[in-house]
Amino acid sequence: MTLMKLARMCEAIEMANGSNRKQEIISESIRSFSNPNIVLDILSEQLESNNIGVKKARIWLAEMLEVFEDEVIASENIWGDLAEGIYQMVLEPNTKLPSMSIDSFSRLLSLDCSSKNNTSFTIIKEELSKMTGLEMKWFVRYWLRTPRNGISSSNVYKALKIHFGEGYNVKYNNYHSPSAIYSSLVTNTILKEKSSVGAFIKPMLAKKYDGKLPENYTIDTKFDGNRYQLHVSNDDVIIFNRTGKIVTEQFRDIATLQDISLCKDMILDCEIYPINVDGSPAEHKKLATRVHSKNKVQAMIDCPVRMVVFDILYINGKSLIEEPYHIRLSNLLATIDNKYITEFFDSLDLIQSYNIAINRGFEGIMIKDLDAPYAIGKRNNSLLKHKPPTINLDVVIDSAKYGEGNRFEVFGSFGISVKHESGYVNVGSVGTGFSYEDLIRLTTNLKKIVDRYEKNIFYVLPRIVLEVTCDLISQDADGNFGLRFPRLVRIRDDKFPADINTLDDIRNNI
């Protein structure tokens, strides 16, 4: 397997319509991989951190290619993507030398790029001089960890399921990387369904409270932040977002906390939310500063955060996933410093707890079944959320139109869809609740995924997820759905299109 072959496969994946076809391409290609494990790790971004960012990459690439940085920036602006811009600058092969091996490519992607003083710059420059334009494109994409081909780890898992058919154990997805699963199936080795530090566990998901309570439950605060998973092994800390992406550098202040626990071997389920100077919860949108800022140090100053822990999944070599919540909670309370633990309302009833949480500026409350194990990647009645009585939906943007007035330079209105069977169904549009910074970011990102243009509307691929709220949902005589007074709650960078609401959810809320 060579870099050129991988680049051509990635190019085919990028041009393919729909997740199903993308998964089929991976499944079909597996048969021709001489080293599928490495390829699967690359596609699912199971790669070590390399300390490179877009700004630094522009500078390095300009010097490596012996061009001006302004040329790199100009090409990036024209094509809407740094990697595509580089590809268009170097369309013809640089050399007649054979394409590098995929093993060498994987090592290249993981080289530490924190400084030009180490050998990484020299090595990358030398290897870049041997690449074709297409190879450079996909090197840059994966170097920056922004493949932009519509493939996530979930797509790779599904491709493996297609490839192996009935022999594929879906439960493995919750504990093991795609490459580990592949190896086990081709060697007929049984993998343990067991958690371990460093291996991401799909989070348990909450259902909306519908008036029915578990027999034995506890109530705690629903914080208006993002879900994260903290893995601690001695002095090493890894922070995953809810999709399994490593985001440790975004929250270096959390990763370096010394007083969370004396335990050095654990996995924590937690929430990180933005706070004001006085420690009160800030607007959720502020957290985007941490997620998107290129200057991580400045982002920590501009957006202070707090972490609250509400579950423990692993401790001192033992998995707690199969244990009921009251056992996990006992371990949590005995292990973690109290100031980092979520606030419980054990002495109060549901209404009192809810009112206190809302009055303190939080999102609502969580209701947890004390007798239930941790349901990996599942949404069930053992974990309930209770928020103010508006209808909140996770939707995907399907189209965009330019705004009016002082927003004429950016997209100001967005068509939105929910899932239905193998496709998506439009449920209206949303244009309120966005900051100007939101609109700039969405405009930039949506232009990269435009599918077609008709009558002043840009139709885009379903990639970007929004959380919206509305007062009610209606349906007209033709069967079309609409949201009354829809407005943005937040841009859900932490969710995939596969996570959005369905048409059945829409019908159930009419």
Image (cartoon, grey):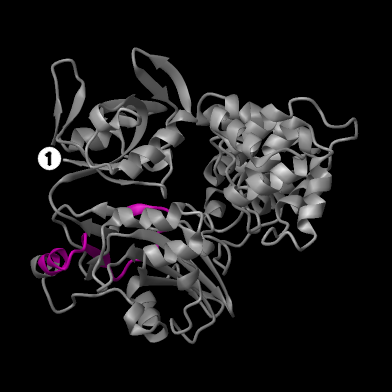
Residue interval drawn in magenta = 354-380
- Name the residue type under label 1: Asp
The answer to whether any part of residue 231 appears in the image is: yes
Q: Residue at x 81, y 53 (%)?
A: 122
The C terminus - image quarter: top left
The residue nearer to you, when weighing 352 against 240, is 240
**How many numbered circles are shown?**
1
> Which residue does the numbered mark 1 point to in the structure image?
471
Query: In this image, 198 relative to 36: left or right?
Result: left
Q: List x then y, in percent, for residue 59.
A: 66, 48
Query: In this image, 339 relative to 14: left or right?
Result: left
The quadrant in which residue 191 appears is: bottom right
Q: Residue at x 57, y 25 (%)?
A: 16
- SS type, badge 1: loop
Residue, far right: 97
The N terminus - image quarter: top right
Q: List x then y, in percent, for residue 452.
A: 45, 17
Residue, far top: 455
Q: List x then y, in percent, for residue 198.
A: 58, 66
Query: In this image, 206 relative to 23: left or right?
Result: left
